């Protein structure tokens, strides 16, 4: 098994509490950081090659260096803990069992960015984790890691936890900022980006929980050492929340050199598909990213082994690849119906669309209705092309990426599983009781689209 | 120091114009005018922060600026994107824009009821104009349209939520014009709705301006409701010495004979409230709803409607008639002539005076044949 940086102490009893966490070497990175210059910390993060773990994979150091620093204007750090992507539950695990690693990473980041007030915006459904985080913040406060003049360095930092009210869209950074300001969680029109005009019109950095937690090992071991783990531009370790038809669903910390095949079938990780079933398809990075059929998941269109990292998973673009996303690894076996699965996702996006811009507001509902019709045996052959056309008109034409996130799963399902949609249309009664099954998808017979 | 103001050169559909820094693409296009201008359903230049939502004004930016001539990867909302020096914008000359815009029109009309014949906004509805200019005939939507429960929001304004396209303009009016915001958007997604919080009636001197900014028939004038069609009334410019602070007192009266049917603020070419001395000419509810006698007003003359209304610009002149024969449309079946109204009804005879006709054609007239 590869190296663990975030979850190496997860089995220590009482690691949730400050005393144990400190004894196991916690808060060393803050001690180190406070002796450094803030810009050097940003440089260190740049050197590490850390990429945002929330889904987009934007280099964190770069994001930090974009932060505007006008005089007399406060700057804010906001932790995006609004983890609502179906299939993604890595942040929940981290915050629930080692909350102090997030607090520690946030103190370092706050110092690097010069933020004296930092927020954790947590999804409303995680109410018990809110209590855990608040307890952790209190412990950090009591031991002089937060508040005024942290460890005698002269740096002040306050930290607050804010609960959301149950909206997926508030995981989009500008909608999150709006919600944090107490407004309706509608995404803002960019530019200006939050790094220039964010929370209360001040420069703001919004980072994912795992990204901020990863700052701790980067500071402890140095950016160069962190960059040596992994492969290419996918440095460090990544938390993967695996679920679906696998023997061992759960959170796995991987260094990004292992292959997808190994991840699914080895006993160290998911432990294979239960009941001797065959792999049909997989969504490798949370519900928004394109679904891949088994053959394309295990090997790329070029015939290479697909690895669990940013580059390899997106190899081939959307035609034959997918995305790393937020690391929500959803596995579907031969008994799963792709149409029903796509309908479930479309229903989710319809429910979560904020309703601000028209393509997403109207398009998501339309797609859901058509998919329901096909799933329940009332679809027409022309509906499949219509779905394709609708998703094409949503993608890229909306204010925020939710439109894209709603369009991609539908596009990928039609691209790779068109036979199954057509089978549903041709067998309106059979499709209610039977499944399309595997057919030829499990074998590597895929011919790249010309 | 010289008083030279630096201008930015922007090219939209091959027409170049110099504009002041901070101008958006849409404003620059409006300065050029004509077909170059993208349509806008949610953007309202007099309301701060509006725009970016409806996506009808999407344009393609073929070159970002002279300094960075890379094209922008996605279509951008022209109402909220500032121009850069040397920017090249494609609106109708773009290959992507007309298709994307037709898609947006289809999305906007998806849940919009086609009740134009009974809608007070018909004839001056921006969605009608948009549908005519950029939409496609027919819809591919086969499901029941979304409906809302009726909500009473006070004595002057009629809210018809099923017609709403969620442009948010009225909430900006509520935020920026009235001192007591009592309405906004509740719920989300395709069930989001304009509503007064807990159905509280809108009670403010400037609430009536919501009717003027509403691009569709979602907010209409209760005092004018079903009284007349807008194309039967004659608009005249008028003013009165209004004492309400903030009211400009300059209005358009929609008259028939000597009767004032409706009072609205004066609109400019783009369907927005006109500015007077640099300030938007919002009017108060007293002027709008309670001053409906011609004697209270000083009439200035006929209003010229330059662009608004699809009928007004004679777009139906070039209406394409179907070229297929009835036989082709009906899969080879010849149409069966049930009655020839041209021979029976006197109305169709050339040169007949209507007062000479005794009455309408009756079934007995046909039976005789």
Image: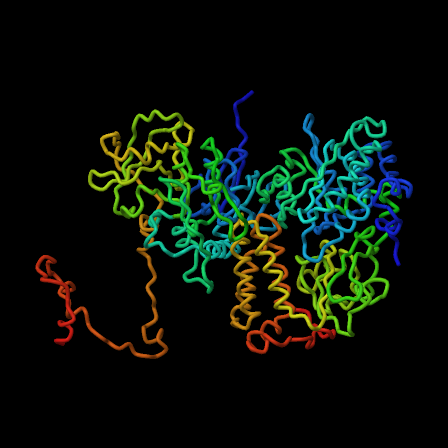
Residue A150 at what x, y percent from top left?
Answer: 82, 30
**B120 above or below B352?**
above
Q: Residue furthest top?
A: B1
> Left or right: A366 with respect to A332?
left
Residue sitting at 64 percent across and 65 percent down? A341
Does any portion of residue A134 appear in the rendered image? Answer: yes
Nearer to me, B113 or B300: B113
Does any portion of residue A450 appear in the rendered image? Answer: no
- Residue B209, image quadrant: top left
Residue sitting at 62 percent across and 41 percent down? A179
Residue sitting at 87 percent across and 31 percent down? A35
**Picture quarter with the C terminus of chain B:** bottom left
> Left or right: B300 with respect to A228?
left
Residue A126 at what x, y percent from top left?
Answer: 70, 48
Nearer to me, A22 or B8: A22
Residue A108 at what x, y percent from top left?
Answer: 80, 37
Nearer to me, B351 or A160: A160
**Picture quarter with the N terminus of chain B:** top right
């Amino acid at each position: 098994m590869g190296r663990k940086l975030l979850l190496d102490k997860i089995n220590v009893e009482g690691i949730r509490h400050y005393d144990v966490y400190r004894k196991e070497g916690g808060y060393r990175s803050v001690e180190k950081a406070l002796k450094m210059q803030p810009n050097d910390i940003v440089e260190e993060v740049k050197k590490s090659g850390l990429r945002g773990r929330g889904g987009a994979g934007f280099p964190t150091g770069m994001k930090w260096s974009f932060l505007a620093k006008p005089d007399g204007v406060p700057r804010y750090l906001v932790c995006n803990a609004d983890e609502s992507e179906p299939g993604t539950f890595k942040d929940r695990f981290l915050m629930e069992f080692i909350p102090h690693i997030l607090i520690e990473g946030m103190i370092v980041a706050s110092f690097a960015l010069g933020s004296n007030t930092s927020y954790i915006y947590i999804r409303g459904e995680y109410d018990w984790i809110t209590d855990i985080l608040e307890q952790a913040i209190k412990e950090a406060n009591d031991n002089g890691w937060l508040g005024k003049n942290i460890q005698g360095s002269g740096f002040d930092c306050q930290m607050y936890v804010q609960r959301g009210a149950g909206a997926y869209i508030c995981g989009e950074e500008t909608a999150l900022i709006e919600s944090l300001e107490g407004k309706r969680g509608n995404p803002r029109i960019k530019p200006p980006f939050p790094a220039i005009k964010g929370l209360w019109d001040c420069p703001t950095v919004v980072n994912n929980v795992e990204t901020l937690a990863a700052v701790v090992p980067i500071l402890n071991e140095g950016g160069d050492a962190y960059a040596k783990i992994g492969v290419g531009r996918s440095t460090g370790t990544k938390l993967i929340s695996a679920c679906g038809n696998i023997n061992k669903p759960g959170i796995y910390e991987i260094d990004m050199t292992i292959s997808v095949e190994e991840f699914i079938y080895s006993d160290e990780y998911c432990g294979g598909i239960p009941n001797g079933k065959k792999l049909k398809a997989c969504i490798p990075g949370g519900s928004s990213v394109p679904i891949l059929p088994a053959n394309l998941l295990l090997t790329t269109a070029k015939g290479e082994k697909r690895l669990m990292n940013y580059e390899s998973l997106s190899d081939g673009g959307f035609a034959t690849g997918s995305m790393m996303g937020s690391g929500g690894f959803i596995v579907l076996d031969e008994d799963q119906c792709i149409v029903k699965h796509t309908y479930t996702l479309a229903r989710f996006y319809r429910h979560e669309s904020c309703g601000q811009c028209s393509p997403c507001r109207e398009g998501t509902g339309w797609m859901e209705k058509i998919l329901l019709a096909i799933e329940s045996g009332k679809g027409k052959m022309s509906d499949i092309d219509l779905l394709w056309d609708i998703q094409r008109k949503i993608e890229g034409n909306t204010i925020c990426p939710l439109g894209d996130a709603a369009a991609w799963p539908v596009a990928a399902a039609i691209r790779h599983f068109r036979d199954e949609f057509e089978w549903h249309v041709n067998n309106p009664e059979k499709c209610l009781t039977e499944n399309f099954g595997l057919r030829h998808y499990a074998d590597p017979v895929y011919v790249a689209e010309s | 120091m010289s008083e030279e103001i630096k201008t930015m050169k922007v090219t939209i559909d091959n027409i170049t114009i110099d504009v002041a820094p901070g101008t958006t693409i849409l404003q620059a296009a409006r300065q050029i005018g004509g077909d170059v201008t993208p349509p806008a359903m949610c953007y309202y230049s007099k309301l701060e922060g509006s725009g970016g939502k409806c996506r009808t004004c999407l344009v393609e930016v073929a070159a970002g600026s002279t300094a960075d001539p890379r094209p922008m990867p996605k279509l951008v909302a022209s109402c909220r994107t500032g121009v850069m020096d040397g920017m090249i914008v494609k609106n109708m000359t773009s290959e992507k824009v007309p298709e994307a815009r037709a898609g947006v029109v289809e999305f906007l009309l998806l849940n919009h009821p086609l009740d134009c014949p009974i809608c007070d906004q018909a004839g001056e509805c921006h969605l009608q104009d948009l549908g005519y200019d950029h939409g496609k005939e027919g819809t591919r939507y086969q499901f029941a349209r979304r409906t809302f429960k009726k909500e009473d929001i006070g004595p002057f304004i009629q809210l018809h939520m099923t017609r709403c396209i969620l442009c948010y303009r009225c909430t900006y009016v509520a935020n920026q014009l009235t001192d007591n915001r009592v309405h906004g958007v509740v719920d989300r997604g395709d069930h989001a709705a304009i509503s007064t919080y807990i159905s509280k009636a809108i009670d403010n001197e400037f609430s009536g301006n919501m009717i003027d900014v509403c691009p569709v028939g979602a907010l209409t004038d209760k005092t004018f409701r079903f009284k007349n069609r807008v194309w039967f009334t004659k608009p005249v410019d008028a003013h009165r010495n209004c004492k309400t602070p903030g009211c400009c007192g300059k209005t358009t009266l929609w008259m028939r004979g000597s009767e004032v049917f409706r009072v609205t603020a004066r609109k400019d070419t783009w369907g927005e409230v006109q500015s007077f001395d640099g300030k938007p000419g919002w009017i108060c509810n007293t002027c709008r709803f309670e001053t409906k006698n011609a004697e209270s007003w000083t009439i200035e003359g006929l209003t010229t409607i330059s662009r608004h209304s699809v009928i007004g610009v004679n777009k139906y002149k070039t209406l394409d008639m179907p070229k297929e024969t009835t036989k082709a449309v009906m899969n080879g079946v010849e149409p069966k002539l049930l009655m020839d109204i041209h021979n029976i009804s006197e109305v169709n005879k050339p040169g007949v005076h209507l007062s000479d006709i005794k009455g309408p054609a009756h079934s007995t007239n046909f039976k005789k044949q």
